[in-house]
Amino acid sequence: MFDSLQERLGSVFDKLKRRGALSEADVTAALREVRVALLEADVALPVVKDFVEKVKTDAVGQDVLKSVTPGQMVVKIVNDHLAEMLGSDHVALNLQVTPPAVIMMVGLQGSGKTTSTAKISKRLTEKDRKKVLMTSLDVQRPAAQQQLAILGAQIGVRTLNIVPGEQPVAIAKRAVQTGALEGFDVVMLDTAGRLAIDEQLMVEVASVRDAAKPAEILLVADAMTGQDAVTVADTFNQKVGLTGIVMTRMDGDARGGAALSMRAVTGCPIKLMGVGEKLEELEDFHPSRVASRILGMGDVVSLVEKAAESFDEEEAEKLAAKMKKGKFDLNDLASQLKQMQKMGGMSSLMNMLPGMNSAQMKKLKDAKVDDKIINRQLAIISSMTPQEREKPEIIKAKRRTRIAGGSGTSVQDVNKLLKQQQEAARMMKKVQKMGKKGMMRGGLQ
Ligand code: GDP
């Protein structure tokens, strides 16, 4: 899987590595090839266009970190955007409902639905210690219900007893009832598939959904079928609504495009992936890991991450040194805000500071960072004169109005920011005093 995409992108970045600086022309040329590589991997055209545009915006004008080459920098940017395109964070199955949690499996025939039903059940039973009941609603295909019963016996998971002639909605209801009465945590419903999407299939799936009220509706899609898998997902999502996708045959030699455009096209997270025929060959879908695998450049990515980390550490240490002197002006606040933006939270920065145990610090540490607020605060600071930034006490009413006007914010916003700086400055003084008493790392209890 992904091999040809890897090769293609690999040669693009090799070319870049031989160059000194990263110009717009370089980025454009590299991205032209990235575009072809993605299209060849069967990624949908609008997705590719959007992707290339985002990478370009990010790459041109990007500061190249010390100790990495511009080419490595672009690899990292492409990697991050690939991960974003795949959905950024792993999304786990939602079982946080009153038991039994119903998981409904939908998809075309042959996509790996029954196998995935058994794989998920096995994992929930063995790893998560859940009591699982499996049920096949496939009354079309002869022996489909027996097939699931055999798999159930293999993995030690109960299957609902088969009542000849019973129809899908009735079976689903009986499964949910049995699940509730007999204390099952999870009820897996393996719905029938067809060779292609048809209206009858959609109606059946929708009526099972209405009867069973599932916590999860998972589409099982075969990665080998490329763009077709994306079209199928899109249709199912529109007609019945999906909560997630299971990509099967990720172990095959498909070009990878289906996985890549799935999230972008449907907005649904890929939650799990099948990586073989065996019932334990199921993995969580981790966008960042899959992205590194696609690029095949995990080493470069971690190298750049380390460089970025040490850059952040240098900055944080500079700030910490200033703080130890008991000084904290608006320049410091600005640099702290930028750090927060990069790290997505106060925690890493706060870990560098003394006095971590104080309740105040903890409150700051737990504070959720909102990008919009940070951007607004940074805009306010950049509307100030250098003198104002160094000596915030000179910012009186008139200056506040001017700064609010210049940054497109309100005087209240400016007041709030100044108050924040005063708070921080006061805390720094306190930290400094404690430091003098020789309690620098011991906390402020
Ligand atoms: P269904 O018709 O959707 O229920 O499909 P099945 O579960 O019967 O699977 C069809 C075939 O695909 C079987 O031979 C499975 O062993 C195979 N299969 C399912 N998932 C995977 C996977 O992740 N990798 C590979 N290589 N084969 C798979």
Image (tube, rainbow, N blue to C red):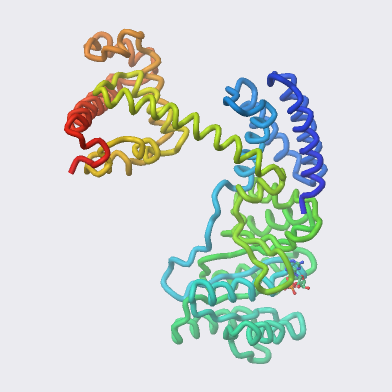
In the rendered image of this protein, does residue 27 appear above or below residue 302? Answer: above
Query: Could you say which quadrant of the image residue 378 lies in?
Result: top left
Query: Could you say which quadrant of the image residue 211 lies in?
Result: bottom right
State whether residue 59 appears in this view.
yes
Q: Quadrant of the C terminus?
A: top left
Q: Position of residue 319 (x, y in %)?
A: 36, 25
In the rendered image of this protein, does residue 412 appear above or below residue 216? Answer: above
Q: Position of residue 66 (x, y in %)?
A: 57, 25
Q: Residue at (44%, 75%) from the top-left corner?
A: 99
- Name the outermost residue toward the front: 438
Viewer-nearest residue: 288 or 402: 288
Is 26 left or right of 357, judged from the image as shown? right
In the rendered image of this protein, does residue 217 appear above or below residue 211? Answer: above
State whether residue 241 appears in this view.
no
Q: Quadrant of the N terminus?
A: bottom right
Is 260 left or right of 183, judged from the image as shown? right
In the rendered image of this protein, does residue 99 appear above or below residue 230? Answer: below
Viewer-nearest residue: 253 or 417: 253
Q: Residue at (31%, 20%) from the top-left corner?
A: 410
The quadrant of the picture showing ligand 1 is bottom right
Q: Residue at (38%, 30%) from the top-left corner?
A: 373
Q: Position of residue 155 (x, y in %)?
A: 62, 82
